Image: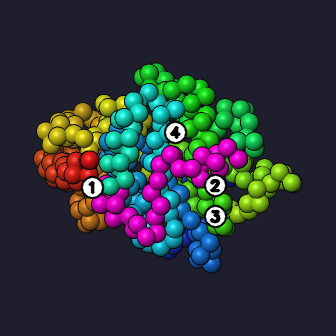
Amino acid sequence: MPAAPIDVTSAAVLTDRLGPTAVRFDHADDALSVLHPGQRESTAIVTGFGPTNAPTAGTLSVMLGAVELQRHLGVPMTVVISDLGAWNSRNVPWPALERVRDQMYAFLLELGLDPDQTEIRSHLHHGNLVRAGRIARYLSRADFQEHRESLLELYADHGLLGSEIGVVVDSLYTVADVLGPFDHGAGQVLMVSGVEEAYFTDLARLALQRQADAGELSLGWGGRIGALYFRVLEGLAGYPKMSKSIPASSIHLNMRPAEIAERVLTDDEKSQAALLSAIELGSGWTAVDVDRARDAFADRLLRPNDWYQVRREFCHSFAEFAGVWHRCAR
């Protein structure tokens, strides 16, 4: 089934199984089956991040959500920092990808990922490279054309994409990431990402089913893939999402406090809803403080100073995360 918005009934079940972390997700795809309490012992989580640049507020929100999810479920998690995938699909120099990859690894641990239950790795992983080679036979060129990133044209317009084959190779590596737990005996995989990456779930399911039906050419894998998709943070200045690859769309952890303030304290109305979303999901604030921010946003035309003060507080919070990020540099 395709990714679908989480309805009221599903949201109630999801909250029962995930607690407060459930509010971070707005789309799901067969996630409730995978999250059934009776299946937990055989479940593994897969998520990942692209090291093309310092984390944006959107990426930070997903990182914080991954930490919360792991703490609540207590199941094995694989976090992939997709250096080789990004090398193929984006126009970023390899030394820059290596630098951000290593910094991101340290930052995720600082945020609280449990190293005893988490494998944090890159695409320079022998097992995953071999797995990508083994599953390629189950997917066609048409599959990659049908299931692809929705923002490819936007990235192409900004001169950010690698070659067509490079984009396919990136997808193949990521499908191998999703299928990795089956290679190690898991019965259920929960894919966790932004909804714009739902095509990876679709491709992984195709490969899993086709290998199961391949007779003597099967790899012997069986199981179920479910997916939860984080709320996507709208981009600043009217962009559809905060993207590391489009600097004007985002705030990121490489910014100095003055640069953060310039973006966050803008009067541009096209940026205000995105800033509220960043506060809701990427501030690390308590529920009480987030509710206060929502009230100030709703009344910003009548009481603009309240909304301005909330944004000033967010500048401070985001700058603190930026300080941690800088300390994680080699």
Whichever of labels 3 and 2 marks the residue nearer the N terminus, that label is 2
Mark 1, Cα crowd under 10 Å, few <14 / some 14-19 / many 20+, is many
Q: Which of marks 1 and 3 is nearer the N terminus?
A: 3
Picture residue at 47% right of the left edge, 34% below the top = 87
Q: Inspect the image, locate mark 4, and give the three-letter code of the amino acid beneath it.
A: Gly
Q: Which mark is residue 184?
A: 3
Foreground residue among 211 and 320: 211
Give the magenta-colored segment's residue range.
107-135
**Counting other residues with Cα less than 10 Å from the Cα at mark 3, is it few (<14), some (14-19), or many (20 or more)?**
few
Which residue was labeled with disc 2? 179
Q: Which amino acid does label 2 sit on?
A: Leu
Q: Name the residue under label 1.
A: 283
At x 42% / y 23%, what residue is drawn?
158
Residue at the front extreme of this rendering: 126
- Measured as percent of width and height from the top left, residue 186 is found at 64, 67
Secondary structure, mark 2, is: helix
